[in-house]
Image: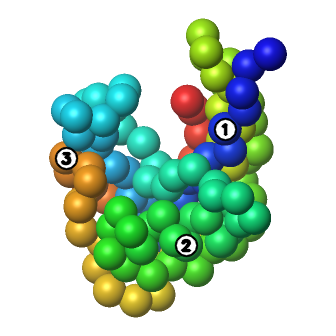
């Protein structure tokens, strides 16, 4: 039986109707792919708590986690990833790419479609 890993991802929107995307660095698994920033839930955390912690660790800013947008499962060869995408807004400091190769604010036109 495959292990399931729970991961929270932040869909951070700014006041210019743009979404924050992060480019995975060359040393990360799935290198050079764009993603919503976030990370794995630790023992005893819920998705929102994990997301606040992960964003502070990875981007050096504080967020407020809002509504869950999507809760989906992706099956890979050795693991199942339970990806929980959550609306979020920055409440303190500016995001800085500490682990990612690049951060980019991407315009949203009309609606957001989450694909993985």
Q: Compute the Cα span from label 2 to label 3.
A: 21 Å
Give 21 or 7, whichever is nearer the viewer: 7
In front: label 3 or label 1: 1
Counting residues from the start of the chain, the first of labels 2 and 3 encountered is 2
Lateral position of residue 56 relative to residue 24, left or right? right
Image x and y of residue 88, in percent:
57, 70
Residue farthest top in this picture = 77
Does residue 12 appear in this view?
A: no
Image x and y of residue 3, in percent:
72, 27
Image x and y of residue 89, in percent:
52, 76
Lateral position of residue 110 relative to residue 41, left or right? left
Q: Which class describes the residues within 10 Å of circle 3: few (<14), some (14-19), or many (20+)? A: some
Measured along the vertical axis of the image, is residue 14 above or below residue 34? below
Residue carrying label 3: 101
Q: Compute the Cα span from label 2 to label 1.
A: 18 Å
Residue farthest bottom in this picture = 92
Tag 2 secondary structure: helix
Residue carrying label 2: 52
Quadrant into which the C terminus falls = top right
Residue carrying label 1: 5
Tag 1 secondary structure: strand
User: Could you say which disc has been placed on residue 71 in the image?
Assistant: none
Counting residues from the start of the chain, the first of labels 2 and 1 encountered is 1
Q: Compute the Cα span from label 3 to label 1.
A: 24 Å
Give 46 or 16, whichever is nearer the viewer: 46
Q: Residue at x 80, y 16 (%)?
A: 1
Q: Which class describes the residues within 10 Å of circle 1: few (<14), some (14-19), or many (20+)? A: some
Give the quadrant of residue 107.
bottom left
Q: Residue at x 23, y 61 (%)?
A: 98
């Amino acid at each position: 039986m495959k292990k399931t890993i729970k991961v929270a991802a932040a869909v951070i929107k700014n006041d210019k109707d743009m979404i924050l995307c992060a480019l995975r660095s060359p040393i990360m698994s799935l290198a050079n792919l764009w993603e919503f920033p976030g990370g794995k839930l630790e023992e005893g955390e819920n998705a929102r708590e994990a997301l606040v912690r992960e964003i502070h660790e990875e981007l050096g800013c504080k967020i407020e986690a809002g509504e869950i947008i999507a809760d989906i499962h992706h099956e890979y060869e050795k693991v199942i990833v339970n990806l929980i995408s959550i609306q979020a807004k920055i409440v303190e400091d500016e995001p800085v790419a500490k682990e990612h190769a690049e951060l980019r604010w991407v315009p949203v036109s009309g609606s957001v479609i989450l694909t993985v």
